[in-house]
Amino acid sequence: MFPGLGGINPKQMQAMMKQMGINQEEIDAAEVTIKKTDGSKIIIENPSVQRITMKGQSSFQIAGEIREESGEAFSEEDIKLVAEKTSCSIAEAKKTLEETNGDIAEAIMKLSA
């Protein structure tokens, strides 16, 4: 972060950062989930999370084991179940599940009405 300061111990670095108005704290987290606008998720397991506050603004630094999940909130089995229970097509069941954000009960009620 500061070139030429490689010989400073971590406590001295923390003190210098505090003098400059930068506060850093470790957050004990089991998992971090980032929900993307397309509905997919980035999940960081066993994370190391640092919260850095400077001039009233907070930012986070996260490192860990990363995996991604697709945006669909339901499975093929869910689609088949809705189609079977409502006697509708697979396409219709999928569309209704998308509209209800994967809520199976709501999709069945909507298609049964």
Image (tube, rainbow, N blue to C red):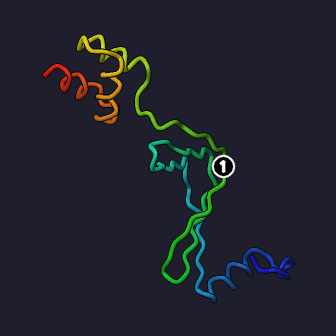
In depth, the one of 3 and 104 nearer the eye is 104
Task: Tell me the quarter of the image containing the N terminus.
Answer: bottom right
Query: Left of 79 or right of it: where is 56?
Result: right
Q: Quadrant of the C terminus?
A: top left
| Left or right: 43, with 108 as reference point | right
The answer to whether 29 is drawn above or below residue 24 in the figure is above
Using the image as rendered, state which of residue 5 and residue 9 is in the foreground. 5
- For badge 1, the amino acid type reads Gly
Residue 73 placement (x, y as % from top left):
41, 33
The residue beneath circle 1 is 64
| Residue 77 in which image quadrant | top left
User: In terms of depth relative to the viewer, which is nearer, 90 or 23?
Assistant: 90
Q: Is residue 16 left or right of residue 5?
A: left
Estimate the x, y position of residue 95 in percent, counting from the top left: 33, 28
Residue ID at (31%, 22%): 93
Q: x, y percentage for residue 100?
A: 28, 34
Residue closest to the eye, 16 or 11: 16
- The vertical placement of 71 against 110, above or below, is below
**Which residue is located at x 55 percent, y 52 percent?**
29
Tag count in the figure?
1
| 56 over 77 or under it: above or below | below
